[in-house]
Amino acid sequence: MKTFYIASGLGNAEQTRMLAARLKAAGWGQTYDWTKHGAVDSKEDLQRVSQLEMKGAMEAELVIVLLPGGRGTHTELGMALASGNQVLINDETGEAFNTGEETCSFYHHPAVWKTALDIECLATMLTLPDKFGKMFAHIFTHINLFAQKLKHLGEKSIERRCNDETQAKPQGD
């Protein structure tokens, strides 16, 4: 049985639950489900949960990182990479993979598989047989990233056109 762990922020708890349910229905085993306890704030609970999440991230065959995520998500990403686990990072917009001040160098680690898919597509891709799932993810991620670039170029084109039209208008007397 393949095993997985999903690292993400508390704001993605519902997506994490949905993805986990789809993977479990396809025969995968979840090493730890942090969504069952949600936020914790006592020192004792933080110590206990940190050990459970660490064990879950280090023992999973596949660690799925759903962005956006916080400090814990990125700590789990580091543990997964250090453990030699397969790591998939998904950012629905793909913007997290752009280089610049906001990027995380570990998103570009050679062992990381990056996807830019909505959660339904990601779940479908992960539950397909391996060779089809990887092909599906590759195709749809590139389509999504291409669409983002086209949208960005379209916005710049509209701005340029508006500026050209503004400058071309005759000035009033």
Image (cartoon, rainbow, N blue to C red):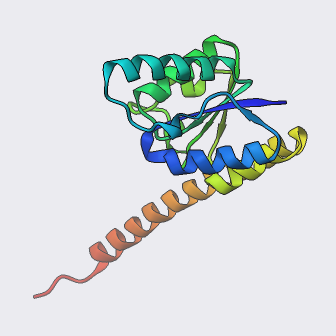
Q: Residue furthest left?
A: 173
Q: Determine whether 8 is above or below 52 in the image.
A: below
Q: How many marks?
A: 0
Residue 137 place in picture, x, y as percent? 75, 46
Q: Quadrant of residue 20?
A: top right
- The residue lying toward the viewer, choosing from 86 and 112, is 86
Residue at x 64%, y 17% (from the top left corner) = 58
Q: Is residue 128 left or right of residue 75?
A: right
Residue 16 place in picture, x, y as percent? 57, 44
Q: Is residue 146 left or right of residue 3?
A: left
Q: Residue furthest bottom?
A: 173
Q: Quadrant of residue 66?
A: top right
Residue 51 place in picture, x, y as percent? 51, 16
Asked if residue 42 can be seen in this view, the reply is yes
Q: Determine whether 147 is above or below 57 in the image.
A: below
Residue at x 39%, y 23% (from the top left corner) = 45
Location of the N terminus (image quadrant): top right
Location of the C terminus (image quadrant): bottom left
- The residue lying toward the viewer, choosing from 119 and 18, is 18
Residue at x 18%, y 82% (from the top left corner) = 171
